[in-house]
Amino acid sequence: MYLPFIFLYAIGVVTRKNPTELVYFALLFLVVTLIMRPEKSVFKKLGFLLGFEGLLFVMALFNPGRPLLETPLGPITHEGVYSFFTLLGKAFLSAGTAVVVTSTVGFSRILAEMEALRFPRILTLTLAFTYRYLDLFADEAVRMKRALDSRAFGVGRREYYRKLGSLIGEVFVRAYLRNGRIYRAMLSRGFGEFPSLEEPRPNVQTAMLALLALGGLLV
């Protein structure tokens, strides 16, 4: 089972206190990537994830401390750089490992493991529906963005972003309404619950990965 490994790995990563303690988990992440041999598209996802999380934590560079570099936004400090790489390392390693494993073995395998570990049924169903309709939600957002661009030609930047904010809210409203229609359609067709997935069995590879993650957690 891969799910225990993901949990142990994530707990081990988020409980580290400095970047040097993350080196073991970074090496384990490389081992997982080599074992799983994910497709090239997964590396694009990892690149996007790294960039997004880097932007998310960029303000940590300006934490109070000894100045390292002066910028128009303020001084970048030694303590800020330390905090930035600690936060980025924790976020990327924990999320990146989950992305690699899930993309390689398939989300249905993760759901099957959740069922085997007796996770609440409502949680498993919610994740299954979320994953199933994620592409539909993204397609709806792209179509609405295209419609906005075709109707907002020549408007000012401030007005454009105001309309874009309204559009984002409209996407969630449409998603909520479509969710109701889908639910009623499923009930009318006799939906009760998903068929039981094949119960995954532990193997040597997943057991070794879980033990390695547990070893990093205990160090």
Image (cartoon, rainbow, N blue to C red):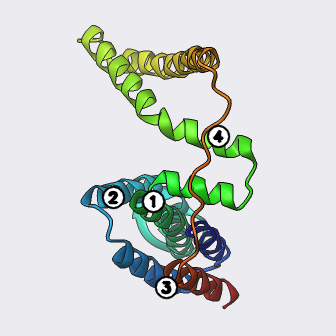
The CA span between labels 1 and 4 is 20 Å
Q: What is the x, y in percent for residue 34?
A: 34, 78
Q: Residue furthest top?
A: 151
Q: At x 59% / y 18%, what residue is drawn?
A: 189
The answer to whether marks 1 and 4 mark residues whose Cβ atoms lie closer than 8 Å is: no
| Pointer 2 with pointer 4, Cβ within 8 A | no
**Residue 55 % position (x, y):** 44, 53
- Taking 139 as reference, is 18 above or below it? below
Q: Which residue is rendered at x = 65% and y = 46% of the image? A: 124
Residue 99 shows which numbered tag? 1
Residue visible at 67% across and 60% down in the picture: 116
Type of amino acid at the residue the image marks with label 2: Val
Q: Nearer the viewer, mark 3 or mark 4?
A: 4
Res. 199 image quadrant: bottom right
Q: Position of residue 36 (x, y in %)?
A: 37, 72
User: CA separation, marks 2 and 4?
Assistant: 25 Å
Report, in whole angstroms, how far the alpha carbon at label 3 lies from the one at label 4.
36 Å
Q: Which residue is mark 2?
A: 42
Residue located beneath label 3 in the image: 23
Amino acid type, residue under disc 1 in the picture: Val
Q: Nearer the viewer, residue 160 or 122?
A: 122
